[in-house]
Image (cartoon, rainbow, N blue to C red):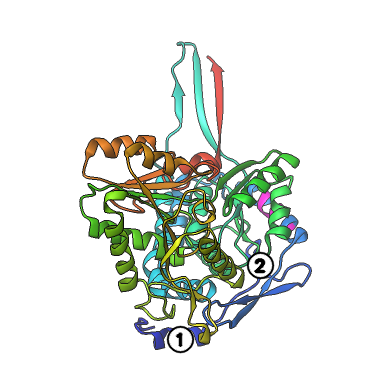
Amino acid sequence: MSKAVSRQDWEQRAAALQVQGQAYIGGQYQPAASGETFECVSPIDGRVLAQIASCDQADADQAVANARATFDSGVWSRSAPAKRKRILQRFADLIDAHCEELALLETLDMGKPIGDSLAVDIPGAARSIRWCAEAIDKIYDEVAPTAHDELGLVTREPVGVVAAIVPWNFPLLMASWKLGPALASGNSVVLKPSEKSPLTAIRIAALALEAGLPAGVLNVLPGYGHTVGKALALHMDVDTLVFTGSTRVAKQLMIYAGESNMKRVWLEAGGKSPNVVFADAPDLDAAAEAAASAIAFNQGEVCTAGSRLLVEESIREEFVGKVVEALKRSWAPGHPLDPNTSVGALVDTTQIDTVLRYIEAGHADGATLKLGGKRVMEETGGLFVEPTVFDGVTNSMRIAREEIFGPVLSVIGFTSFDDAMQIANDTIYGLAAAVWTSDLSKAHRAARTLRAGSVWVNQYDGGDMTAPFGGFKQSGNGRDKSLHAFDKYTELKATWIKL
């Protein structure tokens, strides 16, 4: 098939696309036990893409039982590391081979620009699976320092059945951050994609089987959080629950774990990340371009979005002007199937209503609108909002304290290093932060002072699979990516032998 290069090409592909909407349990697609479905609606134009199986308790019970039986059989959990590595590498290769199909599903499903789906989401998902596969035979167990007549072994074992509840903003990429280390460690997984964006998770289940993953090792249950998500969180035979999403839901999942079997719970939750620009930033133009990208990329539907822009007062007016111009120049909303589009549609009507309410709150609380603030392209039937900049924001305003998950930037001034750090850390969240300065000492002081899981210096959103990702405070616990991610999917066992 020839490479799609234009909006027309992508629209033709979309018209011919066969969309799978069933659950995947034990190596086969099947309807929900109840027969219930829900509509998968594209935010691009309101078109119904497919009827999706609406799973609930019965499906969770079946999938978990299947995952447990598969785990206990040892067909995957006790297979040789080299074998697991080969299969997961083939899985990554198949994701790459189906890149255009998966990118199209991602864009139609949740509205992100096709260029981002192609260049970021799908290659990133394959890279995550492949990186974790490569790590399988690089992680060694330990021998404890013992007396001559004793042998102390410290070994990792797969935790068992993992339930992974993943978000809608980077559907396949976030799923792969869980699937990579969970499968590499030898676990069986029940994946619950968001009801807002289930299509790629459903599709890759068949690719995993094709790659050689035994039936029952990966199961996919589409459905709502309050039905099948709750069922998995309360399930007595799920050993570990991993989640990426809102802090509100993350807290509830911790309660469910306590009410059930004390399953391990690892959470990556919300953020309200500060992007701190000092007057001595090495390149204000580059910093402004990065600040624009940090709030507009993926329509602002990013947990690490640089939604609080902290600017030293001496450069504030000049810098805000540069950010506004950068947004005007490069970040206008457009049709997501146009390869030149940089800002697509918000995921659904609930999300666009939420974003518009926060824009109203910014006005009501006295912030000064510098750019945007409106819904656009309504004639398309799609859900588009202009990138929006509020200046004159105080850190007590709702738009500065609450996660919006949309392209709404709050600009807050500061007068000193200590002032900047106090404002930056004055949040319930601690997912990410950035600092721009030419002063090496100041950069190190800031990195140590900022209470965040990721700190970027003279850039925004740095890192790759080798760097751990996760948050402080109410942004969650545990880490995705890097070798640290394997800690979530393994138990440590100490075996002490008297010789």
Whichever of callouts 2 and 1 sits on the residue coming sooner in the sequence is 1
Residue 36 visible in the shown view: yes
Determine the secondary structure under disc 1: helix
Q: Residue at x 61, y 69 (%)?
A: 350
Predominant secondary structure, magenta span:
helix
Position of 346 relative to 248 (above/below): below
Query: Any mark on residue 23, and which?
Result: 2
Q: Which residues are magenta?
A: 62-68
**Total number of numbered labels?**
2
Please tell me whether residue 66 belongs to the stretch shown in magenta: yes
Dot 2 surroundings within 10 Å: few (below 14), some, or many (20 or more)?
many
| Residue 93 spot, x, y in % from top left | 41, 64
Disc 1 designates what residue?
11
| Residue 370 spot, x, y in % from top left | 39, 66
Using residue 22 as the reference point, say whether residue 333 is left or right of it: left
| Residue 356 spot, x, y in % from top left | 55, 68
